[in-house]
Image (cartoon, coloured by chain):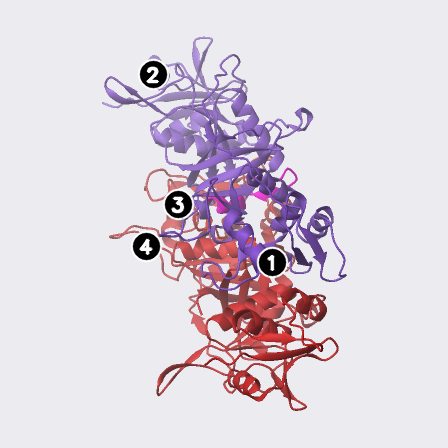
Chain colours: A purple, B red
Amino acid sequence: MVTMLELKWEPKKGVWAEQEETFQKLRNNFFGEWREKKLFLNIEEALYLINFQNAVCMDKNGKAVGFNELASRFAAKGPRFFIQYNAFRDWRDRGLILKRFDRELKGEKKAKSKKKYPAKELKTQKIKADAYWYPKSLFSVIDNEAVGRNLFNEHWLGQLGIYKQERGTLLKLNFLETVFLAKHFGLRVIDSETGRAITDRKILSQVTKEREYTKQLYEVYEEWRLKGYVVKTGFKFGSHFRIYFPGASPVKSDKWIHSRHVLHVFPKQQKLLISEWARVVRVAHSVKKTFLLSIPKLKKSEYVDYPADFLAYRRKKAKEGWVRETPKDKPRYLLVAVSEDEHIGGVELASLLKKAESMGLELLLSISDRETSITYYVLKKIVLKDSGKSKNEYYEIEWMKP
Amino acid sequence: MVTMLELKWEPKKGVWAEQEETFQKLRNNFFGEWREKKLFLNIEEALYLINFQNAVCMDKNGKAVGFNELASRFAAKGPRFFIQYNAFRDWRDRGLILKRFDRELKGEKKAKSKKKYPAKELKTQKIKADAYWYPKSLFSVIDNEAVGRNLFNEHWLGQLGIYKQERGTLLKLNFLETVFLAKHFGLRVIDSETGRAITDRKILSQVTKEREYTKQLYEVYEEWRLKGYVVKTGFKFGSHFRIYFPGASPVKSDKWIHSRHVLHVFPKQQKLLISEWARVVRVAHSVKKTFLLSIPKLKKSEYVDYPADFLAYRRKKAKEGWVRETPKDKPRYLLVAVSEDEHIGGVELASLLKKAESMGLELLLSISDRETSITYYVLKKIVLKDSGKSKNEYYEIEWMKP
């Protein structure tokens, strides 16, 4: 026989269970907090129990209260209350536990082993040819075939002739490659409009006027290139870059090599709708690439206190098979509940990631869409070898089904 | 024996062919323009012939000139010269013809038959329940199950309980649904923060403060809803909406119905990087949905003269099989060459589409990525029944391989 869960509510006290059978059952499922011989529930816990566990919540007069009455008098003024509730609902519905995040976990920091990406220092060379820069097109061209072929075959810098066709003799350099070669290979660049030489810094500032965040894009491009990666456009995969590990070559041996990673830059100053942010990740996943996000490393004073919502537990292997983890275990994730129609900025995301890292947790984004379905993304820090002085930090983002 | 194509160049005259064998061959392939007993070539034609047809271009002194010399003295100051060249190169490389677009085609307007989308006027009803509005979450909730179930089952308005699970009794309404029901179904909405009723207009202006372009999103939502379409979030497909044709129901019969169209809104005021714009289309195509773009209908004075680049021809069926079309045929497309790193605005795209339509052509976007690969998108106007007074126009966007 199923016993109905009985909850009580008073506006000034909140929601609690005092009937023994009820609170035993709730404590066994890690709901609520024991205080003054009562089990007090958070609003999301109370609403979840009412909606999905047949709990009944009564006011002082013994009248059952509904979702809206409870929510509007309890929680309406809190930030994103309904989005938090929806995240809680979804996680609990999967038989898993999560608890409101209301304190930093101290002394629980544990150095997590981070995935390491290799590096192989790039060997630069001195180029003996000119490139002509076409500023309105953001491209330059080297029409010396020998030089072009060498740069392309040795470093996969630029595009020689037609992509994957081995026809044509021009080496076409996009603005990132042009700046990089001018700075590190001593390439002389002639501005086609003036006929005079132009510096890498001048090119970068020209492009920045046309295209926002060019400098941030270039910094990331340069860092990975100097560590031996091949960094090409990720246009076909909806990201800024696709990358190949050190040693990759554009020359066909028995088959074309395929990139397996895309890399996207999220600048400090940028604000994106969550739906836009998720769209970038989604394209990469739809083509089965590992998605890497570049997040700015901030100064201490720049981090903000962006609120995290829950500590989330998952499953672990026990003698009897897989069991759910409980608050007696170390949590897995710092969960942040957002909706597709709100914004997130580079600074906020960097701050959240820092907070999670300081507790030895991974960051879990729970995104409610306009239909209250949830999509989960886990952000895992990676280490690019010898990038201690980097202005950026890098994360793999994985789609997750709890 | 292959004859080498001979071209001549003088800075003030341009590039031309005067040797008979050369110009016969070029005229047969629809290069150049006949003038003063010479065949004058556009810069993109000359450079293409030099790069891919073994043409040699000599200056007055009989010295061969290369890509950069010719380009920088001929075309460098023109807008997006290299991007235009690259678009030209790709189309010609496929054995197809295109010509510089330098005049509007007059008197060639031909009413193209446009795809028609049906409509079935929405039957509204009066709702006898309150919804509570949670402004910071941009959601409202109806906790009257009977009312909620009716709205959900009859109109697929809101989300009853959990998506695709048929559990739960709350009807959750996103901000678009909340406003729509308040305006057209007389739903009374209570602001959960104040306890007082709030109007649809107030909700819309609240949300607009949090989320850019909310009004444009709502206008499109409302238009399609009133024509009987079911309009749900397109979050999982990277677009604003997914749509179901009139008559669709959320109630499972033998299997779930799947949407086959997504709909994305490109507001007048918005400027997007081409790479961002293409990303939206790309997600939809990767999940095999038809992509619909909403473009603002502008006032006559708002249209701008955004330059189109080429008239493009394709193939036609002849007695001997498929043959390429030539300038003796009517062109198929108004081709605009852009690059992944430039911007396009709602006004510019609307203006281009208008220009193409006025000539009875489809608009073809040729997007050069940073590696000079080209992606093509065709924009085809559709007609949503009885939408004469609409503030928007709608286009199907198709990925195209010439």
* Residue that mark 1 sits on: B267
In the image, which is nearer the foreground, mark 1 or mark 2? 1
Q: Where does the magenta region start and end?
A: A266-281
User: Where residue A28 is drawn, which disc sits there?
Assistant: 2
Measured Cα–Cα span from mark 1 to mark 2: 52 Å
Measured Cα–Cα span from mark 3 to mark 2: 40 Å
| Subunit ID for the residue under disc 1 | B
Q: Earlier in the sequence, mark 3 or mark 2?
A: 2
Instruction: Identify the amino acid type marked 3.
Output: Lys
* Residue that mark 3 sits on: A288
Q: Position of residue B260 (x, y in %)?
A: 38, 59
Tag 2 secondary structure? helix
Tag 4 secondary structure? loop
Task: Check if mark 4 and mark 2 are on a common chain.
Answer: no
Task: Check if mark 3 and mark 2 are on a common chain.
Answer: yes
Q: Is residue A275 magenta?
A: yes
In the image, which is nearer the foreground, mark 1 or mark 4? 1
Q: Position of residue B289 (x, y in %)?
A: 40, 58
Measured Cα–Cα span from mark 4 to mark 2: 40 Å
Placement of A331 over or under A228, stated as above or below: above
Asked whether B90 or A269 is in front, the reply is: B90
Quadrant in which the N terminus of chain A is drawn: top left
Instruction: Identify the amino acid type marked 2.
Output: Asn
User: Where residue B257 is drawn, which disc sits there?
Assistant: 4
Is B353 on the left or on the right of B401, as rendered? right
Residue for point 48% across, 18% down: A111
Measured Cα–Cα span from mark 4 to mark 3: 26 Å
Task: Check if mark 1 and mark 2 are on a common chain.
Answer: no
